[in-house]
Image: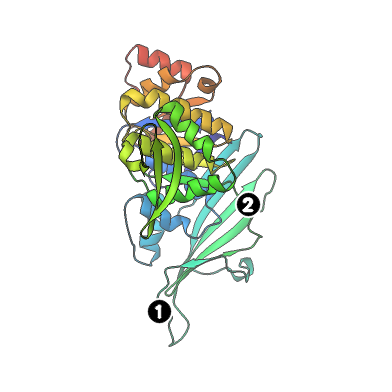
Amino acid sequence: MITNLHIKNFKGFSDLSIKDTSRVTLIGGCNNVGKTSLLEALLLFYGRDNPYTVSNLHAVRGIPSVEGTPSSLWAPLFLDYDLGSEIEILVDTEKQEREKLLVRFHNTIREQSIANNIVASDMKQPFRTDGESALFGVLEMTYRAGEDVEGKTAHIVLRQDSVKMYPDYQVASFPKTWLMISGARNHPEDAKLFGMMDIVGKQNEITEFIKRTIEPRLVSLSAITLGDKTILHAQLEGMRRKIPIAYLGDGTARLVSIILAISTTQDGCILMDEIENGIHHSVLPKIWRGIMAAAKQYNCQIFATTHSYECLAAAVNGLDGELAEDFRYIRLERDGEELFSTTYSHRDLAIAVEREWEVR
């Protein structure tokens, strides 16, 4: 679990340090201060062995496709689109171990560093038959942990016909990461995740979470295929038939998505943009209790963003005891060109909310 975070030359962050994160860390700040970019930096750090991670970062911003060139595909990751700079993401963990990811761009392949094993490829375009495909560049990603000075390096090679990753190490099992976009719910994906819980006999855990927090009438959940789609359905007390979970309202459907993501990402990390989106303020305290309890049960770390004062107040009112101790609020703020962070414990945030300080 990450306890401290330091980001350099990534998107709008020239040099940002965040201290004392916890099991659940809520991130606030004004528009365009970098809340979503912070989640993207964490996604890049945990997705360093996945050649699709960079393209996924474009999808987060609602960009369906980009040109297959370094300036379009990779430059947006770097501060001021400067491919000559170096991205550094450094984290401290609860095990008192320091981990670092360095990302660099090269115009040529360092042959001695690239293994023959190809992990994956995308951007499948017609393959050239009139000679060797053009090389557009290489994104070098080096990961170091603890006392490992040399680190482990993977190269994402961009050619005219493909993007491929070549690691010089055996791909490790990194913590699983799940990114939830504001307002975006994939109902078939929710049904798939519920099916994963059902297979191992843990479907009732999801039902109980929802029943305790937001929908006391819930009897059971089922993944039902209608036509070519599998959708999660709910059985409610007093109803003769099951109904799609979406019919229970945005708040219930959103919470189901969150709990399913947490329960299927044990020992991993969940990244959530605008966590309060679609949820009525009256049930937010219950939502917070459910999220915190699930994160603790499944040993999952959560980083989420918000711009809602009601969401902050709900975290204050909905959490106590051990759940409150596992909560932190980080406020990002710009002072001219400088970006800095302020960390609030649950107690600090409670004082700020009680005195009506502006801490969003």
Q: Nearer the viewer, residue 177 or 139?
A: 177
Q: Residue at x 46, y 25 (%)?
A: 289
Question: For this view, does 335 lie left or right of residue 114?
Answer: left
Q: Earlier in the sequence, mark 2 or mark 1?
A: 1
* Depth check, front residue: 199 or 158: 199
Kind of residue sitting beneath label 2? Ser
Identify the secondary structure beneath mark 2.
Answer: loop
Q: Does 177 sit left or right of 82 as displayed?
A: right
Residue 126 disc label? 1
Q: Quadrant of residue 332?
A: top left
Q: Quadrant of residue 180?
A: top left
Q: Position of residue 210 (x, y in %)?
A: 44, 32
SS for callout 1: loop
Residue occupied by mark 2: 173
Regarding residue 348, the answer to whether it shows in the image is yes
Label 2: few (<14), some or many (≥20) within 10 Å? Answer: few
Measured as percent of width and height from the top left, residue 250 is found at: 32, 37
Q: CA distance from mark 2 to mark 1?
A: 33 Å
